[in-house]
């Protein structure tokens, strides 16, 4: 009775495996990937702006950026240098999917070399995903403990080990109920660490962009600020010029334009990077109104 029931089940299983993917399944997968990619781009854009604005005592939420602006900033983080890696990943996935048909097409000498290499004990140990995963996970734990004791540890290296190690460790047991739970937990940790890595990279890019702005303030647009009343713009290199006549009684020079958001201008004093590092940097938030007028001029380098 059991044998009679198993044969139809096996036939249905083989038929299910031979069925081509349905169009709706492909559309659903593409939609999921696009939605996930969009969320990651928004997160990376926020992390970039947070790293960029932090030296100026600002936050992305202070400037009311929209999700599409975050996504554009995140997309700008990708350069042509990423294209070869993305192409290599696609080729690896395609090769892994069609390895059963690709292996017989390899030259016989190359297949013989591969078989000889697999017969070696070291290669068998390294090829055992559970052993490799245990070693990598143990190394990640050791580095994490070292970091807790205030030792210098490369964060990217630690995250890479945490991403790969648990996945390899739990991969062989994913066919059992408990193994599926362990693999799902490892996949969750890996996804979290991937997001962490992306945010860390974006924040570092933002911090480097902010440092470039501070180092090249002479190239930033100059701002002349005209006001009816005196403003408390107390910063190094900001010059106040009073006028006896006219509507605007005061002019402030020595300011550079950082960001414009609508009718709000974020201004910084024209200080050197050394002066900024010494704590003389400031960020002034000025909203253009009837009693305040701004003139924006091209940036100039000192002679």
Image (spheres, rainbow, N blue to C red):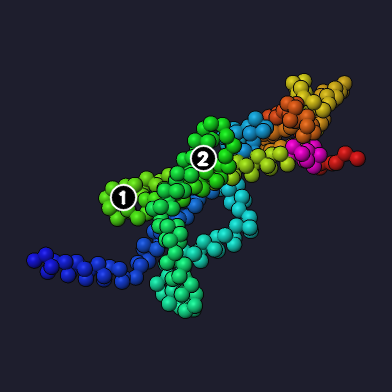
Residue 281 drawn at (x, y percent)? 73, 29
**Image-quadrant location for residue 156:** top right
User: Residue at left 48%, top 43%?
Assistant: 140
In this picture, residue 213 sits left or right of residue 262: right
User: Residue at left 41%, top 52%?
Assistant: 131
Closer to the chain start, of discs 1 and 2, is 2
Q: Is residue 193 visible?
A: no
| Residue 247 included in the magenta stretch of the image | no
Residue that extends furthest to the left in the rendered view of this protein: 1
Residue that extends furthest to the front in the rendered view of this protein: 121
Q: Is residue 226 above or below residue 27?
A: above
Marks 1 and 2 sit apart, C-alpha to C-alpha, by 26 Å
Disc 1: CA contacts within 10 A as few (<14), some (14-19) or many (>=20): some
**246 or 164, which is in the foreground?**
164
Residue beneath disc 1: 179
User: Residue at left 40%, top 57%?
Assistant: 128
Callout in the foreground (1, 2)? 2
Q: Is residue 133 visible?
A: yes
**260 or 295, which is in the foreground?**
260
Residue beneath disc 2: 143
Residue 228 drawn at (x, y percent)? 77, 23
**Image-quadrant location for residue 275:** top right
**Image-quadrant location for residue 31:** bottom left
Badge 2 element:
helix
In this picture, residue 51 sits left or right of residue 298: left
Residue 264 drawn at (x, y percent)? 67, 34
In this picture, residue 113 sits left or right of residue 302: left
Q: Which residues are magenta?
A: 213-223
């Amino acid at each position: 009775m059991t044998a009679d029931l198993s044969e139809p089940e096996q036939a249905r299983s083989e038929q299910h495996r031979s069925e081509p993917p349905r169009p709706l399944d492909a559309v659903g997968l593409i939609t999921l990937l696009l939605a996930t990619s969009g969320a990651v781009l928004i997160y990376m854009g926020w992390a970039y702006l947070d790293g960029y604005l932090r030296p100026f005592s600002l936050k992305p939420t202070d400037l009311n950026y929209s999700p599409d602006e975050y996504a554009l900033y995140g997309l700008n983080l990708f350069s042509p240098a990423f294209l070869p890696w993305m192409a290599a990943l696609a080729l690896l996935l395609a090769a892994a999917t069609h390895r059963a048909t690709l292996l017989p097409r390899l030259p016989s000498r190359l297949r013989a070399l591969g078989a000889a290499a697999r017969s070696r004990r070291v290669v068998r140990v390294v090829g055992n995903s559970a052993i490799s995963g245990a070693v990598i996970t143990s190394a990640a734990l050791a580095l994490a403990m070292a970091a807790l004791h205030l030792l210098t540890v490369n964060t990217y290296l630690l995250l890479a080990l945490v991403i790969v190690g648990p996945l390899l460790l739990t991969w062989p047991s994913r066919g059992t109920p408990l193994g599926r739970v362990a693999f799902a937990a490892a996949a969750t940790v890996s996804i979290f660490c991937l997001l962490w890595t992306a945010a860390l990279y974006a924040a570092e890019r933002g911090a480097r962009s902010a440092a470039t702005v501070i180092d090249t303030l002479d190239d930033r647009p100059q701002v002349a600020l005209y006001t009816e009343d005196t403003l408390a713009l107390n910063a190094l290199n900001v010059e106040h010029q009073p006028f006896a006549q006219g509507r605007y009684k005061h002019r402030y020079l020595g300011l550079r334009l950082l960001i414009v958001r609508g009718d709000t201008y974020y201004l910084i004093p024209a200080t050197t990077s050394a002066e900024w590092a010494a704590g003389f940097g400031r960020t002034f938030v000025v909203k253009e109104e009837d009693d305040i007028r701004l003139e924006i001029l091209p940036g100039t380098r000192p002679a």
